[in-house]
Amino acid sequence: MFLKRIELAGFKSFADKTELEFVQGITAVVGPNGSGKSNISDGIRWVLGEQSARSLRGGKMEDIIFAGSDARKAVNYGEVSLTLDNSDQSLSLEYNEVTVTRRVHRSGDSEYLINKQPCRLRDITELFMDTGIGKEAYSIIGQGRIEEILSTKSEDRRGIFEEASGIVKYKSRKRETEKKLQETEQNLLRIHDLVTELE
Ligand code: ATP
């Protein structure tokens, strides 16, 4: 699996629809300071589900929408799409190409799509779980991240190995099931109380 294409429109400094094609091997993005290089990796993390405006270097989520410049007006929504080659079926979808899209409007409404079909953020998170591509995964190493990885707590570092070994999905499902079990136990207790009251 590899990233084939990224399309940005109304996202940060990319007012117009901008398409970047990647090929196998190494691609370097070069440009003067402030020209938007980091905005590309912000776009990737955003599509993958980044919910923190601060980690996208903004104050609020609306800050990711092109805010206008001397030459042009602000736009009303921002959108980023990632297209991944999935011919090795690393993503559990029966398509050789998978396009994931995220769109946000100034009103705050968000949309997520997989191959142009509306979906939930959760579907995107699950799709990338254990692939090393998720927003917290090791495929995006931002400035200062290596130092952070080396200096963080051992449990946090373990998360990287868990993602690589493919067990994050199962841990996440276990957590959800435990939560449901707890809720069911609470409901059972409540029913028991009601039955005792009625007897
Ligand atoms: P450096 O080499 O200094 O790290 P860079 O090429 O990585 O720079 P970025 O940090 O990606 O540059 O881009 C910063 C630019 O993006 C700034 O000029 C900033 O004004 C612009 N920018 C960020 N958010 C928006 C927005 N919502 N609307 C318009 N422009 C924006």
Image (cartoon, grey):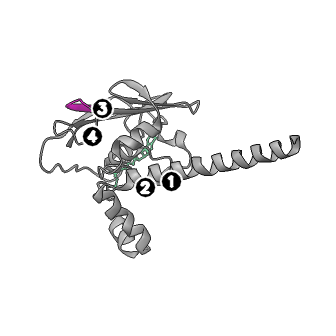
Q: Label 1 is placed on what type of residue?
A: Arg
On residue 188, which mark appears?
Answer: none
- Asked if ligand 1 lies within 8 A of label 3, the reply is no
On residue 175, which mark appears?
Answer: 1
Residue at horizontal 81 percent and vertical 47 percent from the top: 193
* Spot occupied by residue 66 in the image (x, y as percentages of width and height): 45, 36
Question: Mark 3 or mark 4, which is nearer the start of the sequence?
Answer: 4
Q: Label 4 is placed on what type of residue?
A: Leu
On residue 171, which mark appears?
Answer: 2
Q: Residues within 10 Å of mark 4 (few under 14, many from 20)?
A: many
Question: Mark 3 or mark 2, which is nearer the start of the sequence?
Answer: 3
In magenta stretch: residue 98: yes
In space, the residues marked 3 and 1 are separated at their CA atoms by 29 Å
The residue at which mark 3 appears reads as: 99
Q: Label 2 is placed on what type of residue?
A: Lys
Task: Tell me if I can see residue 143 in this picture.
Answer: no
- Asked if ligand 1 lies within 8 A of label 1, the reply is no
In magenta stretch: residue 108: no
Residue 152 or 165: which is nearer the viewer? 165
In the image, which residues are magenta?
A: 94-99
Q: Residues within 10 Å of mark 2 (few under 14, many from 20)?
A: few
SS for dot 1: helix
Residue 153 or 89: which is nearer the viewer? 89
The residue sitting at the front extreme is 199
SS for dot 2: helix
On residue 91, which mark appears?
Answer: 4
In space, the residues marked 2 and 3 are separated at their CA atoms by 26 Å
Q: Residues within 10 Å of mark 3 (few under 14, many from 20)?
A: many
* Spot occupied by residue 26 in the image (x, y as percentages of width and height): 14, 51
Q: Give the number of callouts.
A: 4
Given contact means CB atoms under 8 Å apart, are the residues at marks 1 and 2 in contact? yes
